[in-house]
């Protein structure tokens, strides 16, 4: 009986506490948390503005293509390059010479620079080292070598075969954390902070060290640095945050289409766009959104055009927020009641066991 009275008193005290908390939770949930809006003339659906020239930032992805990859004449020759060598003087070709023998005596074709850095002119003339030389230096080296064979100096022509550059710069390139794009054997170029046209000029200037009159095309293949955010109030259970890349033409309605619409607990009457401003201005730009007017009436008045850095905030519906608040408050009492009921049941079992057992064991 004594345990039953204690349980009743505890239950009554808990109900009083819960009622008080319920009133507090409802008041908190119904409080208007929307910041005071600052109405400005901003772009919206049917009245959009054009974005300024795109400024490259990490981690954007750039599509870089070079129209011309022909090596410069003063570039150093490398193993794997091919030289076209022509000479007007050769070892005399005899009528009885076979086709293979004739090919050995002629110097009028393309010769590959081998792994040892030399071109092999055939068994009749031997090898000449040319790797690390310019084309003009290679021509002089081949001419000096042939002068040791012929009495009369031959007339010689040495040209680089049109094999392209060391590496074709063609494809997507990630803007790294240091603001550079890596061009393989051609090194790196800083492009962050520049527009696409400026980046094109920088890349052409850099590649001109290795490629003859390079023409570069630069475009954005991955818009990764310019984003906007959607924040869904969880009503006391944490906020959901989405970061979405911006393409430059989205409105509020487009933004919610990317995440499947409003969340279940989201309030249709407490949605706004918070637009960042420079820190020195110390001002907020809050754009309230009339959801029903946009989706049901086709209104464009609050269907704002989204700009980079915008935060679209969706507050929780007051009823859901109250329910979550009360659930969080009641949870400790539910555990307390559970322990109390469990203890009371155990005591009763012991008492019943004692009465039936005549002083024996309770269980």
Image (tube, rainbow, N blue to C red):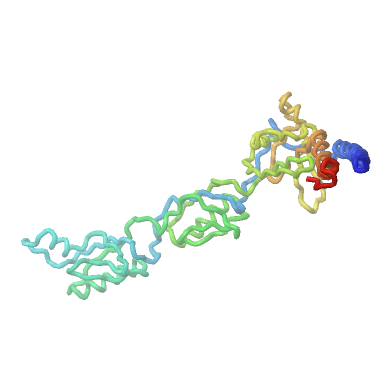
Residue 31 falls left or right of residue 182: right
Residue 111 falls left or right of residue 252: left
Residue 53: percent from the left, percent from the top?
62, 46
- The quarter of the rendered structure image containing the C terminus is top right
Residue 26: percent from the left, percent from the top?
87, 36
Residue 110 falls left or right of residue 273: left
Residue 141 falls left or right of residue 194: left
Residue 178: percent from the left, percent from the top?
60, 60
Residue 149: percent from the left, percent from the top?
19, 73
The residue lying furthest to the top in this view is 297
- The quarter of the rendered structure image containing the N terminus is top right
* Depth order, front residue of 194/341: 341
Residue at 79% x, 35% y is 320
Q: Is residue 234 visible?
A: yes
Residue at 23% x, 66% y is 121
Residue at 30% x, 71% y is 129
* Depth order, front residue of 243/26: 26
Q: Is residue 20 visible?
A: no
* Depth order, front residue of 209/128: 128
Instruction: Using the rendered view, name the quadrant where residue 227 is placed.
Output: top right
């Amino acid at each position: 009986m004594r345990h039953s009275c204690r349980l009743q008193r505890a239950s009554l005290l808990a109900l009083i506490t819960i009622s008080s908390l319920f009133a507090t939770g409802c008041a908190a949930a119904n409080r208007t948390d929307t910041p005071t809006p600052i109405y400005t003339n901003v772009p919206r659906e049917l009245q959009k503005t054009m974005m300024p020239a795109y400024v490259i930032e990490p981690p954007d992805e750039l599509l870089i293509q070079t129209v011309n990859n022909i090596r410069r004449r003063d570039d150093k020759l490398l193993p794997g390059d091919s030289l076209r060598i022509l000479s007007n003087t050769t070892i005399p070709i005899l009528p009885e010479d076979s086709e293979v023998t004739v090919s050995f005596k002629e110097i009028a074709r393309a010769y590959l620079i081998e792994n040892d850095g030399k071109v092999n002119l055939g068994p009749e003339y031997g090898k000449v080292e040319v790797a690390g030389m310019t084309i003009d230096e290679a021509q002089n080296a081949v001419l000096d070598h042939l002068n040791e064979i012929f009495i009369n100096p031959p007339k010689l022509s040495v040209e680089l075969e049109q094999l392209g550059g060391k590496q074709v710069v063609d494809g997507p390139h990630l803007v790294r954390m240091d603001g550079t794009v890596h061009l393989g054997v051609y090194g790196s170029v800083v492009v962050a902070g520049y527009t696409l046209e400026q980046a094109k000029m920088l890349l052409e200037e850099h590649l001109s060290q290795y490629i003859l009159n390079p023409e570069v095309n630069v475009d954005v293949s991955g818009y990764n640095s310019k984003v906007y955010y959607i924040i869904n109030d969880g009503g006391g259970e944490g906020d959901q945050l989405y970061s979405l890349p911006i393409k430059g033409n989205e409105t509020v309605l487009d933004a919610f289409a990317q995440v499947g619409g409003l969340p279940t607990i989201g309030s249709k009457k407490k949605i706004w766009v918070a637009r960042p401003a420079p820190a020195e201005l110390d001002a907020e730009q809050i754009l309230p959104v009339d959801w029903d007017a946009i989706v049901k009436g086709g209104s464009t008045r609050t269907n704002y055009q989204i700009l980079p850095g915008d935060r679209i905030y969706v507050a929780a519906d007051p009823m859901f927020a109250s329910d979550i608040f009360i659930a969080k408050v009641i949870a400790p009492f539910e555990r307390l009641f559970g322990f109390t009921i469990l203890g009371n049941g155990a005591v009763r079992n012991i008492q019943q066991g004692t009465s039936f057992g005549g002083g024996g064991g309770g269980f």
